[in-house]
Amino acid sequence: MPVRDGGAPRTAGVRLLAIAVALVRGRSDQAVSPERAATRRGARTLRVGATRLLRRVHQIPWRGKERTTLRRSAKQLTTSIEGRDTDGGIMAEDLVTRLLPVLSRSLEAEFNVFDVMRHGRHEKQLSNVFGWLLEAGGTHRLGDAFVRIFVDEVNRALAGATVFPVEAPYLVRQEVDTSVSGVADIADLVLENNAARIVVENYYTSDGHGHSYDGYRAFGGRDGRASVVVLLCRDEDKGLLVDGWEDAVVLTYGTLLERLRREVGEDYAREHPEQHAFIDQMYRKYVKGRGRMDDGAVLDFVVAMCATGEAERYGRRPIGVAGEEFATDLAQQARERFTESRELLQAVKGRLRAFAVKVLVPQLNQALGQAVFDDATARFQGGYEWTVNLGISEVAHPEGWRGMSGGYALQIKFGPSAWLANEGEPRWTEAVDPGFVDYSRPLITNGERGVVRQSSVRMQEVLDGLGPDDVRLRDEFLSLLNEGGAR
C-alpha cells in the first residue's frame, strides 16, 4: 500500500484497523476460527497478523481528530494483543495450567537450619557437615553409608580409569596442609586409607578459587597411593574449571544428598529423628530447592511463558508495572478457570452417578448373586463432594455386608476428593503411590478396609458417556472386594 496523503489510504487504513480488531476478537472472515484461536498456535497467529496490520496503520498520515482517535484505537488494540485485555482471550488459554505446577509452591519462607547458619559462599560450615557425614562412627548413626555413596560417585565419575575401594574404611581429616614443595595450600577434606587418598576441595561452585590442582594431586599420590582430586560444590559450572581443575572429579551436594535420602528409610527416621531432621533440612536446602523457588522451577516458569506466547512481557518497562499487569491478567484467568473446573467436576459427578445407578449397581448385584447395592448417591460436601457412594441395601440386609459412613462401603472418588483420600487422609491405609497416581482417572475405594485403587476409566470418558456394556468399574470393584477377603 503506498503511504501518501489522501482519502484512499486513510480509508484503507480504517479497513486495516477493522481487520486487525477482527483478528483479535475473532469476528471476521479473515480471522482464524475461535477454536483455533484458543490454541497456542492460533494465539500466536493472531498476534503476528494483527501486529503486522497495525504497523501499516501507523504508517498512514492521519490528519486532525481522526489521527488522534484512530491511533488511540490502534494503541488500545496493541495493548489487547500484548495480553493485557483478558476479555479478548489473547492471553494463551493454557497459561494458568502450564504455570500452576510452578506457582503452587508457597512464597512463605520455611524454616531451615542452614538459612539460620547463613551459609553463603564460605565453605567452612558445609565442610564440617560433610566431614561429619563421612565419619563412619559419627553421631549421625549412618555408619559408613555416606562414605560408600561418596566413593561410589567418585568411581562413577572416573568411569573405570581408577577404582577406589568402596567397602574399605577411610580416615577422614579436615583442613589438611597439602604443601609438597613449600607452597602452603589447605584442602578442606581428605579421605585416606592404606591404598588410596581422596583430596577434596569444597566450594559453593565448581571453581578451584586459587587452590592448586597439581599440588592436591601430588599430595594425594606422594607415597604411591591411588589418588584423585574432588571438587565438592553446590553448583557445577564447567566454565570455571580451569588451571587443571578440568581434570578434577566434580560432585554436587545434590547428587550426594539425593542418594543419601534414598539410602535412609523409615526405620532411620523413627530410630534417629534428630539426625534425620537435620539431614532432611540439608536435603531441602540444597536439593529440593534454594530459597523461595529453586532454579529449575524458575526455568520452568520462563519456558511456560515462552511456550504460551507470553514472553514479550519481559520486554516491557517499567518492570514493576509489567509484573502487576501480568499478575492481574493471570488472576482473572485463574478465577475463570477455577469456576469452569468446578462446573466440569459437577458434570462428571452427575454423569458418574447416573452411570452407577443405571449400570454399575445392577452389574455388581448380578455378579454377586444378590441385591447387595440398592442405590448410588453423591450428597457429600466439602472435600468429599466429588464422591459417588454405592449404598448397601437396608431392606435386603445381605448377610456378611457391613458398611461404614452410613452404609457406604464402596465409593468412586475423583478430582479433589480422590486426592484427599489418597494423600490427605491417614485413615486410607493402602493408597496409590503419589508418584504414580493419575488424577485424570477416578479412584475406587473400599472403606471397610481403608483401601484406595486406581481406576482405568478416564474422566473424559465419563463426560463423553460410558456405555451400558462397559464393565471396567464393575470388574475393578469385584477385584477390590476379593483382595484379602471380600467383606
Image (spheres, rainbow, N blue to C red):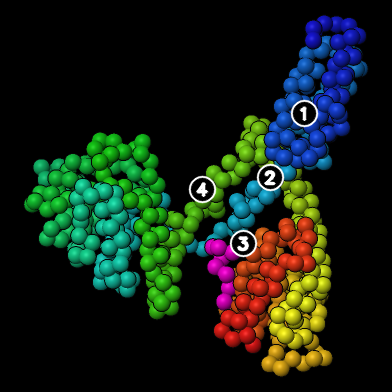
174 vs 383, left or right, is left
Image: 170 above or below 397: above
**Can you give x and y, in whole percent of width and height, for residue 441 in the image?**
67, 63
212 vs 322, left or right, is left
Residue at the spot of label 3: 438
Question: In terms of sequence position, does the residue under pointer 2 or pointer 3 come before the other?
Answer: 2
Image: 285 above or below 205: below
Q: Is any atom of residue 357 visible in this view?
A: yes
Residue at the spot of label 1: 78
* Contact check, label 2 and label 4, Cβ < 8 Å: no
Mark 2 surroundings within 10 Å by alpha-carbon count, few (fewer than 14), some (14 through 19), many (20 or more): some
Question: Does the segment drawn in magenta span residue 338?
Answer: no
2 vs 3, front mark: 3
Q: Main secondary structure of the magenta part?
A: loop
2 vs 1, front mark: 2
Mark 3 surroundings within 10 Å by alpha-carbon count, few (fewer than 14), some (14 through 19), many (20 or more): some
Q: Residue at x 23, y 50 (%)?
A: 160
